[in-house]
Amino acid sequence: MTSEAAALGRAGALLTIDLDAVAGNWRRLSARAAPAECGAVLKADGYGLGAAPVGRALFAAGARSFFVAHLEEGIALRAVLPEPRIVVLNGLLPGLAADYAAHDLIPALNDLAEIAAWAGHARALGTALPGFVHLDTGMNRLGLAPEDQERLAADPSVLDGVGPIAWMTHLACAEEAGNPMSREQLDRFRKAIAILPKAPVSIANSSGLFLGPDFRGDLARPGAALYGINPTPGRPNPMAQVVRLQARILQTRRVDTPMTVGYGAAHRVEGPARLATIAVGYADGLPRAASGRGAVRIAGFTAPITGRISMDLITVDVTHIPEALAAPSALAEVIGPELPPDRVAESAGTIGYEILTSLGRRYARRYLGGTE
């Protein structure tokens, strides 16, 4: 029995996550960020790969600052990692300041009301509480608007009780190296912090680290690049691949014209063919939009997806693959070295982030390396 077959067990597909590759990617990004600190973003359950095992592997590699989106994500991560700094990017939820403080979580303070609430809670406790103050420089999503930045500069006493402080912003177009928006945001950020109390700054996301030293700041916040997503689209990916998804071939069959395949009879067979049905579908994170456009790899051969991707199954054309290699119980690679998440995403008209964060819960999961 192969190691894949043993790990697969009763499941229809096997998701293998290389924790050593994640740690190696963090080290590459950390070297690029130096002399700034390099943190790690673990939101959306570590981009779908498991915040707990990924977080432990990154902590062992040297990461000491972690970022999540939601309060509950922060609480769950704190239970696994008692020591490092954990920042909750979506901010301070009304009436729940005590929960953040109790779990030693740092809110990203996204408006003046959040600043006032966090500072008030700190004063009530009689101790300073750290906070990341988010300054919006053009994303127009979260963060203090320019007029609120000016109000804060005019009366920084509203920060009394918040400390230490860090100023942060978020780049809108960092993956587009030639887009002037990133430099415009950096200029706005510099003007804002010039009139605010001096404190460390956090600017660069994954792609921001490749825009040059001006964007490093004091603390980088890479996310997708840790998990193998290319932070430099259009150029070779500097990151190691982390994920491999292999699914069982359940059945093969010979078909001939005028037969059709799948729901809606969306694919018509043009000539004698051999098809394989594979145990993965859109419920497992393979986008329906990749129907008729995506492919899998079987024993080194590319097998195009035919017909519509359904909830639990896909059908691929294996006419050109030796029958012994594309037989029931064989494994097809859905994501892997030759089909990285970015390429799978391209076939579905989306981005690699969505592919990873949509990975379902029906897989057998296998972690390699790290502390697992």
Image: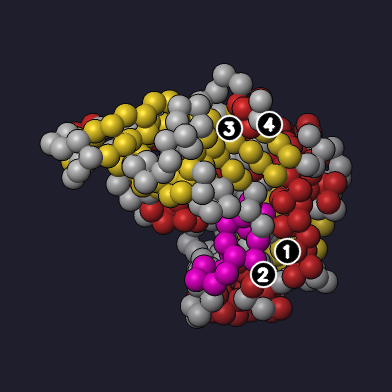
Residue 344 lies within the magenta run: no
- The mark nearer the N terminus, 2 or 1, is 1
Distance between mark 2 and mark 3 Cα atoms = 33 Å
Q: Which residue is mark 2?
A: 209
The residue mark sitting in front, 1 or 4, is: 4
Mark 1 near mark 4, Cβ–Cβ under 8 Å?
no
Q: Quadrant of residue 186?
A: bottom right
What residue is rendered at 37% in x and 33% in y?
276
Residue 174 visible at all:
no
Q: Which residue is mark 3?
A: 14
What residue is rendered at 33% in x and 32% in y?
310
Left or right relative to 152: residue 171: left
Mark 2 near mark 1, Cβ–Cβ under 8 Å?
yes
- The mark nearer the N terminus, 2 or 3, is 3
Q: Which residue is mark 4?
A: 3
What residue is rendered at 48% in x and 62% in y?
140
Residue 230 lies within the magenta run: yes
Left or right relative to 231: residue 346: left
